[in-house]
Image (cartoon, grey):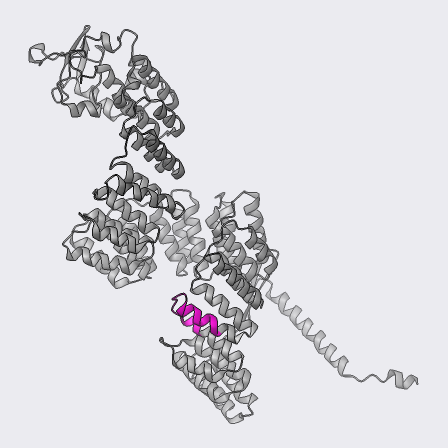
Amino acid sequence: MIYAQGGRWEKMTLLELPYCFSPCMKILCRTSLPLDLSMIFPNDIPVCGEIPAKQCHCNEKHYNDGWQVIFRGSLASHVYPVSQQTQIQTPFKNPTFRSPLLFTHSFLVSLCETHQLEHLPQLRSKQPSPFSLRKQIQTQMILTGFINDSFAASRLVTFCALSESQALEYCTKILYWIREPNVFSWNVSIRGFVESGDLEGAVLLYKRMLQSGVMKPDNHTYPCLLKACSFPSMNCVGYTVLGHVLKFGFAFDIFVHNASITMLLSYGELEAAYDVFNNGCVRDLVTWNAMITGCVRRGLANEAKKLYQEMVAEKVKPDEITMIGIISSCSQLQDLNLGRKFHLYVTEHGIELTIPLSNALMDMYVKCGDLLAARILFDKMAQKTLVSWTTMVLGYARFGFLDVARELLYKIPEKSVVPWNAIISGCVQAKNSKEALALFHEMQIKKIKPDKVTMVNCLSACSQLGALDVGLWIHYYTKRHSISLDVALGTALVDMYAKCGNIAKALQVFQEVPQKNCLTWTAIICGLALHGNAWDAISYFSEMIRSGLRPDEITFLGVLSACCHGGLVEEGRQYFSQMIFNFNITPQLKHYSCMVDLLGRAGHLEEAEELIRNMPIAADAAVWGALFFACRVHGNVLIGERAALKLLEMDPQDSGIYVLLATMYSEAKMWKEARNARNIMKERGVEKIPGCSSIEINGIVHEFVAKDVLHPQSEWIYECLVSLTNQLELLVFTCEIPSFGDEFVS
């Protein structure tokens, strides 16, 4: 280290720094306050060629790191003996020598990257802004001529690109102005754009780097660039960058190799990712983690499990990242037993239970329904993040423990919209939509600003309740607060309007959505089917196919439902066949239920029963119920009895089955069988479940159950019902009286 005392420059290594001096150095390295360069660069310090400098007693690596600094005599309290100094060289005699002032600039920029030097008393009074710091440092570097040194300039570029006060535009101006920027400068600039979320800027900077022709990318360029391209919208650029990786010979670099796998998995290119994974010369723990995590993010939980088994077979020891990925796969599969095994593995093998790993375990337990285990983990956490609180709030709300969810929500120290979104989402998933809208109202009272996720959740609640007025208000709110209509919000609005009865508005919003995905098309197809517009639904399905989007199982459910409502039996058969053979989608129970309903409504009861017998999976109550209702409509008692018996085997306490069976017997004039059905219902102690209805008035949803007295206006409502009943009876009586007036007059 160079240091000044009485106008003389002495040298010492950092390790040789005397004890009395070391506190000053520790303060410099620990602090975080901005630095005023006028206090570090007094006017009496000469420029490079005039300094009577001695070379630092340290190797070239220390020079490249730029951690040497000049201290004036005011900071020094000890002079290292000159007798122990080594060879003296001037910058003119050693072409590789860099003057102390160069390292001063580099070191100061390094300190400024984290706003250091806050504890120095002489610097506390002056706190220049980061922008001012950049200007001061650049000015000094221009005056001393070190702006043209690629090493010194790279420190300034790093400060602009990666410090908390990022100035990417300023960074690129410096980068383009430097005569010969090194590859490190290009890399940190690209990284700055990626970390700020400006992916296009990162790609354009990489393009400029290639066009310069001076500097070629290295193995540190591509991991960051491939990360920037790991978005489906960037897939064209990503494949081009992958070609450059092969061209420049970095395909077998382990860091580039791992980043390539992550990018391919983000595109859903599982086969290509496996090719890169299997053909790599080296596979380390990071490679396995990239594959496992990538599969989990794409929802390929079973693939993640297989990879983990292969990894263990190759005797690669998993770490915290591995466990987070594989436990997340258990969450997706809702495999509680497997999740418990991995939790036990973490405990037995001493893997540190970090906050992300604890959050992953809690999420697994919540999604698998073990709230107690999740709560035990939550209570044991010394430090809880917003993710921890949100996971528990969502879990309790999803399983109907709304009081506990609210209690946790109010305890969260950080005021954020995220846990509120979680509790509203949990209520919607639990079909407790009325409470979801009440929470949305409470959220506004507490001055917590809703975001797009809040709007989507509340629109889903409106869809469940049929609350059109609230849905209209939410739509107006999004426009008034300039919340952009993206695919998620647009799909939620289309679904809400369709389910609340305003199909015209649903079609209007559908046309306004800028980019439509499979879910958007599915929402409008199902909406048109719900309103009985069968041919319109089929037309939109055909248009969706022509647009290049691939339908999923929900889309086909909408199409089959449209055929069912429109009585389009032949079309329904064709689409059911296309789903299996053209799109390789395995029919689920809902698809079979829809086909049985379609055939049953058309009177093809034998074909419907045959379809149920040939199902590869066991039919549920919805499938047998569709056949039973069709038999009642068409008066087919024989098949209806078989369907009813199957339903009673599944749920002997369902009162609706007994009532419909008795009704079917009565309509067929089978009075004895009808009485037997009612007697069996009484003997088994089955009571008819009271019906429930709801109505929306002035944005408030009111629910009513037969013989309910919980509503605050129940007495007035019953008086009104009695009055209406009396008026109806009087009207019926009046209509039945013959009119003799004209005859008497004549």
Q: Position of residue 389 (x, y in %)?
A: 35, 49
**Left or right, residue 494 beside residue 744:** left
Q: At 53% from the left edge and 69% from the top edge, which residue is drawn?
A: 562
Q: Is 278 one of the magenta-colored residues?
A: no
| In this view, 430 is above or below 598 | above
Indicate the position of residue 313 as horizontal and vertical percent values: 15, 58
* 376, above or below 251, in the image: below
Tell me the chief SS of the magenta region: helix
Find out whether residue 586 is within the magenta segment.
Answer: yes
Image location of residue 439, percent across then percent down: 48, 52
Choose between 80 and 138: the one closer to the eye.
Answer: 138
* Front residue of 428 and 635: 635
Residue 292 in view of the camera = no
Position in image of residue 585 (x %, y %): 39, 66
| Residue segment shown in magenta | 573-592
**Quarter of the image where one finds residue 577:** bottom left
Q: Is residue 256 above or below residue 31?
A: below
Q: Residue at x 50, y 82 (%)?
A: 604
Q: Nearer the viewer, residue 457 or 384?
A: 457
Quarter of the image that includes the C terminus: bottom right
Is 298 left, or right, of 579 in this rendering? left
Residue nearer the viewer, 80 or 108 = 108
